[in-house]
């Protein structure tokens, strides 16, 4: 939104499900959305040993792409979630999970780089949601600016996932 509003020229962001018509996006990488729990915590499972999201206490993002994807999953599977907390930001989710407030969902890239990564555990048998596509985002107008164009060209030449 800050790029669209002209507050910033370029952003590294997750590609939204519905791309804004004024935005240009260059894919740089993908990262999975992963469910995490407090290290050594137990959590509800289905008969098939999957994480039971109908019974699990959850710490969720207040808004954003992962929240929309998770809400869509809840609707498709007729699950009424038990939400313990809604927070802004992935580090907030990880902090709450670390304190035992519930199970959270974050991009794997965030988990790998978090100072809390050793205090939480990824849940292996959890629902799979579509991964994030992470990349550069700007407007067509900004691409005409020399600095933005140079960054865009550099990223295009270095990225194995150009799109």
Image (cartoon, rainbow, N blue to C red):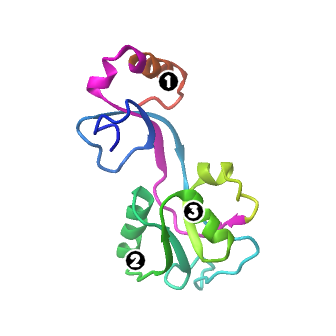
Sort mark 2 into few (<14), some (14-19) or many (20+) by Cα contacts within 10 Å.
Answer: few
Q: Name above or below for residue 134 compared with residue 161.
A: below
- Disc on res. 92: 3
Q: Nearer the viewer, residue 130 or 2?
A: 2
Q: How far apart are marks 3 and 2 (CA)?
A: 27 Å
* The stretch drawn in magenta includes residue 36: no
Label 3 or label 2, whichever comes before in sequence order: 2
In what quadrant of the picture does the N terminus appear? top left
2 vs 1, front mark:
1
Local SS, label 3 = helix
* The stretch drawn in magenta includes residue 138: yes
Q: Distance between the residues labelled 3 and 1?
A: 30 Å
Q: Nearer the viewer, residue 27 or 2?
A: 2
Asked whether the beta carbons under mark 3 and mark 2 sit within 8 Å of each other, the answer is: no
Label 2 or label 1, whichever comes before in sequence order: 2
At x 40%, y 77%, the residue is 77
Sort mark 1 into few (<14), some (14-19) or many (20+) by Cα contacts within 10 Å.
Answer: some
Label 3 or label 1, whichever comes before in sequence order: 3
In what quadrant of the picture does the C terminus appear? top left
- List the residue tagged with mark 2: 77
Q: What range is drawn magenta here? A: 120-148
3 vs 1, front mark:
3
At x 45%, y 59%, the residue is 66
Q: Name above or below for residue 135 compared with residue 66.
A: above
- List the residue tagged with mark 1: 155
Question: Percent x, y for residue 114?
Answer: 67, 53
Local SS, label 1 = helix
């Amino acid at each position: 939104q800050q790029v669209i509003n002209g507050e910033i020229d370029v952003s590294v962001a997750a590609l939204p499900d519905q791309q804004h018509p004024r935005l240009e996006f260059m894919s740089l990488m993908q990262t999975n959305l992963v469910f995490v729990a407090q290290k050594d915590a137990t959590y509800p499972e289905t008969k098939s040993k999957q994480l039971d999201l109908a019974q699990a206490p959850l710490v969720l993002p207040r808004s954003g792409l992962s929240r929309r994807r998770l809400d869509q999953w809840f609707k498709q599977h007729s699950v009424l979630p038990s939400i313990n907390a809604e927070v802004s930001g992935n580090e907030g989710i990880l902090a709450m999970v670390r304190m035992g407030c519930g199970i959270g969902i974050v991009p794997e890239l965030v988990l790998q780089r978090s100072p809390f990564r050793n205090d939480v555990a990824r849940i292996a048998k959890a629902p799979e949601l579509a991964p994030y596509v992470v990349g550069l985002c700007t407007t067509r107008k900004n691409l005409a600016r020399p600095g933005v164009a140079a960054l865009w060209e550099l990223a295009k030449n270095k990225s194995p996932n150009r799109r």
